[in-house]
């Protein structure tokens, strides 16, 4: 699968945030999006995820024209997308059913929970967890529903050193299996096959 | 796809049970409204018996609105609405499933307790049966029309009142035919048939309107 973004323009509140942006992402490649606050990093990720409409340009997924990479992508944004009154396990079970397009390659919830060292807290309601733990539950979603493209907005936020190392290892193995990653970040991410895309204000 | 919708349905039911208050606060609000009317109208049993169905309908209408503003807002705030937009399941079906779960957890309990509260409004057995049936047939329309309002106001912080202002005028036909179906009974089946038609039309049309509003609101 290959992601082809050509000359996209995205407007928010009547203001052009992105204009004439183009890049190609091949399997096993990562794109690290950097730039100052307000440069349009989150806007780019949301546009790729199909959550913001394109004012111009187009996105091609695996040679087919699409308005976005909506159905092949995972989006982990600033909000975690988990219900506070449900447990971590219940939230992940729900997202597994809701998002899984390639069921055979998805991990069972118990395995995904283990991958982010969440086993001990999987039965607690999300409301009782810390910000870093909630973040890890959101990231465990990447495994319960296998999708080739990961759109990660500041993925390292609120994570401790240990969890950062775990996430980085998972990102590397995802790339190793032919997956793709677009990550917006302020921290340096040490990934193989990573290209930089610096956005300006 | 049906697996995804079933998972969504159970998630909604579980949240309603877990977070508590949803159904029971609606019933208490309904009780308060239904109990206030006799105080306002006075101790005239004949008058109360005549306007009882209308009181029950108004009370149910207002109680249904309670909590509807959070139907999509909670999902929007925590980001799960974004993720649902990215699933392969169509947003229209997601809206319909959420409405079904919402109706089951908030509107159906109101229909169930309506005959009890009707007793306090001097309704006889036949009238109780008619008004309960009319509520059962009409509340799906209320929930679904309300869902359009909830979708339009999804990104507004204090959208609750605005939603009520938007939704209440749209529910006028349901109210008119609901009350006349409760009053007419078997003598004239037309109002009840129209009430059912309103509910079916809302089930068919409202998910499209609400989904369009949600897609637009995500921007």
Image (spheres, coloured by chain):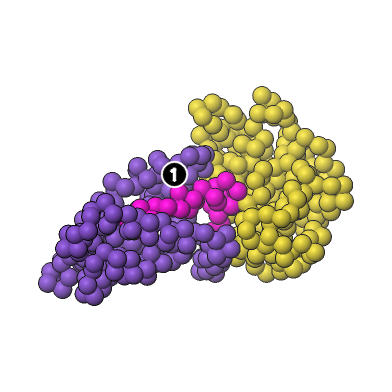
Chain colours: A yellow, B purple
Q: Is residue A4 above or below residue A101?
A: above
Judge by depth and name the residue closer to the eye, B25 or B40.
B40
Q: Which residues are magenta?
A: B59-88
Q: Residue at x 51, y 39 (%)?
A: B157
Q: Residue at x 35, y 42 (%)?
A: B165
Q: Any magenta on residue B143? A: no
In this view, the residue farthest toward the front is B43
Q: Is residue A101 left or right of residue B53?
A: right
Regarding residue A173, the answer to whether it shows in the image is yes
Q: Is residue B125 above or below residue A188?
A: below
Q: Position of residue A9 (x, y in %)?
A: 56, 32
Q: Which residue is mark 1?
A: B160
Q: Secondary structure at mark 1?
A: helix
Quarter residue B37 falls in: bottom left
Judge by depth and name the residue closer to the eye, A30 or A118.
A118
Q: Chain of mark 1?
A: B
Q: Is residue A60 left or right of residue B28?
A: right
Q: Any magenta on residue B86? A: yes
Quarter residue A199 falls in: top right
Q: Is residue A6 above or below residue B71?
A: above
Q: Position of residue B190 (x, y in %)?
A: 15, 66
Q: Residue at x 69, y 50 (%)?
A: A150
Q: Is residue A65 left or right of residue B199?
A: right
Q: Position of residue B208 (x, y in %)?
A: 39, 53
Give the prevailing secondary structure in the magenta stretch: helix
Regarding residue A151, the answer to whether it shows in the image is no
Q: Residue at x 76, y 42 (%)?
A: A157
């Amino acid at each position: 699968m290959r992601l082809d973004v050509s000359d996209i323009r995205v407007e928010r509140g009547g203001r052009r945030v992105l204009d004439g942006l183009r890049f190609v992402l091949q399997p096993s490649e990562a794109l690290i999006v950097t730039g100052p606050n307000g440069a349009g990093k989150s806007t780019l990720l949301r546009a790729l995820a199909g959550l913001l409409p394109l004012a111009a340009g187009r996105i091609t997924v695996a040679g087919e024209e699409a308005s976005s990479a909506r159905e092949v992508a995972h989006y982990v944004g600033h909000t975690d997308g988990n219900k506070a009154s449900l447990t971590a396990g219940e939230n992940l079970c729900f997202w597994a059913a809701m998002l899984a397009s390639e069921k055979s390659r998805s991990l069972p919830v118990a395995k995904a929970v283990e991958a982010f060292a969440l086993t001990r807290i999987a039965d607690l309601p999300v409301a009782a967890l810390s910000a870093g733990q909630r973040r890890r539950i959101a990231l465990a979603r990447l495994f319960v529903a296998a999708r080739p493209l990961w759109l990660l907005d500041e993925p390292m936020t609120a994570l401790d050193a240990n969890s950062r190392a775990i996430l980085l290892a998972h990102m590397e193995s995802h790339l190793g299996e032919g997956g793709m990653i677009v990550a917006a970040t302020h921290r340096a991410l040490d990934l193989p096959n990573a290209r930089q895309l610096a956005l300006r204000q | 796809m049906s697996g995804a919708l079933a998972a969504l349905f159970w998630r909604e039911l579980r949240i309603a049970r877990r977070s508590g208050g949803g159904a029971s606060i609606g019933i208490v609000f309904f009780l308060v409204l239904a109990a206030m009317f006799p105080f306002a109208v006075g101790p005239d049993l004949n008058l109360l018996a005549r306007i009882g169905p209308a009181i029950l309908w108004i009370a149910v209408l207002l109680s249904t609105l309670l909590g509807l503003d959070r139907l999509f807002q909670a999902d929007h705030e925590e980001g799960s609405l974004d993720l649902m937009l990215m699933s392969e399941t169509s947003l229209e079906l997601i809206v319909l499933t959420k409405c079904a779960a919402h109706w089951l957890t908030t509107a159906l309990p109101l229909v169930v307790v309506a005959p009890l509260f009707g007793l306090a409004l001097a309704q006889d057995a036949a009238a109780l049966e008619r008004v309960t049936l009319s509520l059962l047939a009409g509340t799906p329309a209320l929930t679904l029309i309300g869902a359009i309002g909830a979708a339009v106001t999804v990104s507004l912080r204090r959208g609750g009142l605005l939603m009520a202002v938007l939704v209440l005028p749209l529910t006028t036909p349901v109210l008119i035919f609901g009350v006349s179906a409760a009053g007419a009974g078997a003598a004239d089946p037309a109002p009840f048939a129209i009430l059912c038609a309103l509910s079916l039309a809302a089930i068919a049309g409202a998910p499209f309107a609400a989904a369009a509003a949600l897609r637009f609101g995500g921007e």
